[in-house]
Amino acid sequence: MLPTGYTAIIRQDGPWWIGWIEEVPGVNSQGETRDELLSNLREALGEAIEMNREDARNAAGESFEEVAIEL
């Protein structure tokens, strides 16, 4: 089962909102509003997961098995 949620750490910095996804290093963004920041974080997280998925499958080669891991 894949995670159903992630934690966004956000704060306002002057006129900008900035944030990070706690569980995924390198996923961060900014926005002019809180809502824009959260939307940008969702998009960045989705892109990062898809890129990581593609990298893992390429590294595994042609024959691999997918196994769900729960915490």
Image (cartoon, grey):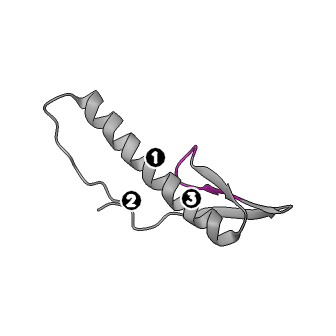
Task: Look at mark 2 in the image and give the residue it sits on.
Answer: 71
Q: Is residue 44 left or right of residue 10?
A: left
Distance from the alpha carbon under mark 2 to that under mark 3: 23 Å
How many discs appear? Answer: 3
x 20%, y 46%: residue: 66
Q: How far across and down, in percent of the image, does residue 68 sit?
A: 26, 54
Measure how far apart labels 1 and 3 are at the Cα level. Answer: 10 Å
What is the secondary structure assignment of the residue under circle 3? helix
Q: Nearer the viewer, mark 2 or mark 1?
A: 1
Q: Identify which residue is drawn at 29% across, 62% down.
A: 1
Secondary structure, mark 1, is helix
Q: Is residue 22 magenta?
A: yes
Name the kind of residue labelled 1 in the image: Ala
Q: Nearer the viewer, residue 34 or 24?
A: 34
Q: Residues within 10 Å of mark 2 (few under 14, many from 20)?
A: few
Magenta highlight range: 18-26
**Marks 2 and 1, the one that precedes in the sequence:** 1
